[in-house]
Image (cartoon, coloured by chain):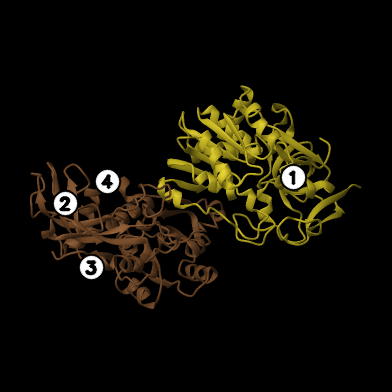
Chain colours: A brown, B yellow
Amino acid sequence: MPTNRRFILERRPNGVPAAADFRLSEESVPEPGEGEFVIRNIYASLDPAMRGWLDDAPSYMPPVPLGEAVRASTVGKVVASKSADFPVGTWVSGLGAIEEYSLSREGGFTRAIDVSSVPSPSNYLSVLGAVGLTAYFGVVDVLAPKAGQTMLVSGAAGAVGSLVGQIGKIHGCRTIGIAGGPDKVRRLTEDYGYDVGIDYRGKDRAAIEAEIRTAAPGGVDLVFENVGGDILDATLDCLADRAVIALCGLISEYNSVEKVGARNIWQLIVHRAMIRGFLVSDYLPRFAEGVTALAGWMGEGKLRFDEHIDRGIENALPAFLRLFEGTNEGKMILQLGEP
Amino acid sequence: MPTNRRFILERRPNGVPAAADFRLSEESVPEPGEGEFVIRNIYASLDPAMRGWLDDAPSYMPPVPLGEAVRASTVGKVVASKSADFPVGTWVSGLGAIEEYSLSREGGFTRAIDVSSVPSPSNYLSVLGAVGLTAYFGVVDVLAPKAGQTMLVSGAAGAVGSLVGQIGKIHGCRTIGIAGGPDKVRRLTEDYGYDVGIDYRGKDRAAIEAEIRTAAPGGVDLVFENVGGDILDATLDCLADRAVIALCGLISEYNSVEKVGARNIWQLIVHRAMIRGFLVSDYLPRFAEGVTALAGWMGEGKLRFDEHIDRGIENALPAFLRLFEGTNEGKMILQLGEP
């Protein structure tokens, strides 16, 4: 009888999550009731937004309860079922948890996926999952780019940012990416088609601002913000009139107790600009449109995407912390089992 | 021969403007050349935004040059003219300076005004001037309110804020005003029709947030922001989904060297909300629409507005500083001469 190892939240992290905030429990594999099925999880998505779910703070989702497995998007295979819709052997994706087996039921967020059409089932956690859809709707709906506009992307070598830049190019934008370290910055132009790559590492706000200004002398029309902090403030000083900032994430702040936010919002008045927050989940009714577009661009060879896969539930924390250390190269995924 | 006293910027202020930053010069009254005319200024508008014009920082207007009179909107009368369009005796309003006489010319920003239709020519610096038009376009165009929505206004007893609340009521909104001190808060509900008045004085961010939440248990749909700082951060914690924040000003920051901005922008993601900066000058092509609407509401007795008039160019600085001390009651105007 296999055991079900689960990555349990024991204590709410204060700042950077620590080993003592979590526990690996060993439980028995659940049995499905009527209409239920058991998924053997093969991949779990590790995303910056998960940091917020660990706090007991008002947000767009309830906090992960103490004593429960940490919430994550997953891809897996049905191994036991009392549901005609999800027979044994079905590949599925949904909002589950970091655990080797999950109990799910019909009518929830779990859906069947077609793994024959993609290079790897894990792609449903990257380019065809929330990451790809976040990039798609953030660009197409929030920024609504016009050909010839200048688009600035922070976290540009990350899972979302690398796709944002490429979708911006597909729409005819001039793209400027900001990332940390020479390797990532090289990948911005070589792998992800950015016109300019800026390395923020070791630079203060004024130096970052100077580089953005050099790259966009007429100002930045569109901003896809993943980072916040000094990078956002430097960006606010380089806006073109009527700039739009799509606020997707603030990874520089997730482990900070004191938030800095956007100190430079006066520039929103100067340039009649706007910051608009968005969540991919609001676009659920349009997910099919997004997946179709992304799969189409993949098929045409227009989208390069990378996945960084660490293995084993025992590595859940160090794999998650890579997102904040910037040591992942591509969408961060934890592999929990063999396909 | 009269002299022309002028309020000259001598040095750029560091923080709160001080007496030594300015000088009162006595010069001869200018002579008009061909197409020019001389205005005897009777009223000058004192606005928070003028603080920014004193800094040597990139903004939507060039800084006031050192050695020049401080820029201000004015109302006055033509006393000498070589322009057929602006004969002696014409009442005019325009973007001039704090000085007793100004030289102006045809084709500039100075326009003739009809003082017979208003209680006082100074109204062209308040309800029918930039202040009234800022309130009008900020509400009608940026916030675009729907009946039944909850509108929060900071600086709600101020020149702009008092009109914003009343225009919000005209559009069927429930209005909550924030102001400083019991007298102003009393005027919010008694004079300006706010449904709820909140006093921020002596309260920290958490206490302000608690009062907003009590006043708007379902969250705030529309925000007209004049203040920034703790008030903006407390507001961001009380947004309804898809809230819109019209960013008009940040008076709490204008004399600060270190800006705090909006620390709490994570809430923009949580609520898919937006902050949008705007400038009344962008609505120049629609000013007639705004003046017509405001004059119409005045005629119907739906708009109460107050003017706080201090007298004498020698009082320019203390009168200006009232805006930051909060000791003005209504639109701050400096009277430079008799009508």
Report the residue marked by disc 4.
Answer: A284
Q: Reply above or below: A214 against B191.
A: below
Task: Name the mark nearer the viewer: 1 or 3.
Answer: 3
* Residue B3 or residue A35, whichever sits in front: A35
Q: Residues within 10 Å of mark 4 (few under 14, many from 20)?
A: few
> Residue drawn 66% across and 57% down?
B256
**Residue A30 got which mark?**
2
* Residue B48 or residue B175, whichever sits in front: B175
Residue B168 drawn at (x, y percent): 54, 32
Q: Reply above or below: B258 against B215.
A: below
Report the residue marked by disc 3.
Answer: A312
Going from N to C along the chain, the mark reached first, 2 or 4, is 2
Task: Name the mark nearer the viewer: 2 or 1.
Answer: 2
Under mark 2, the amino acid is Pro
Q: Secondary structure at mark 3?
A: loop
Count all numbered tags in the image, as a single digit: 4
Report the residue marked by disc 1.
Answer: B322
Query: Image check: B324 left or right of A97?
Result: right
- What distance separates the C-alpha of mark 2 from that of mark 1? 69 Å
Q: Residues within 10 Å of mark 3 (few under 14, many from 20)?
A: some
- Chain label for disc 3: A
Residue B13 drawn at (x, y percent): 73, 59
Q: In this view, which residue lies farthest toward the top?
A: B300
Q: Reply above or below: A182 against B250.
A: below
- What distance separates the C-alpha of mark 2 from that of mark 4? 29 Å
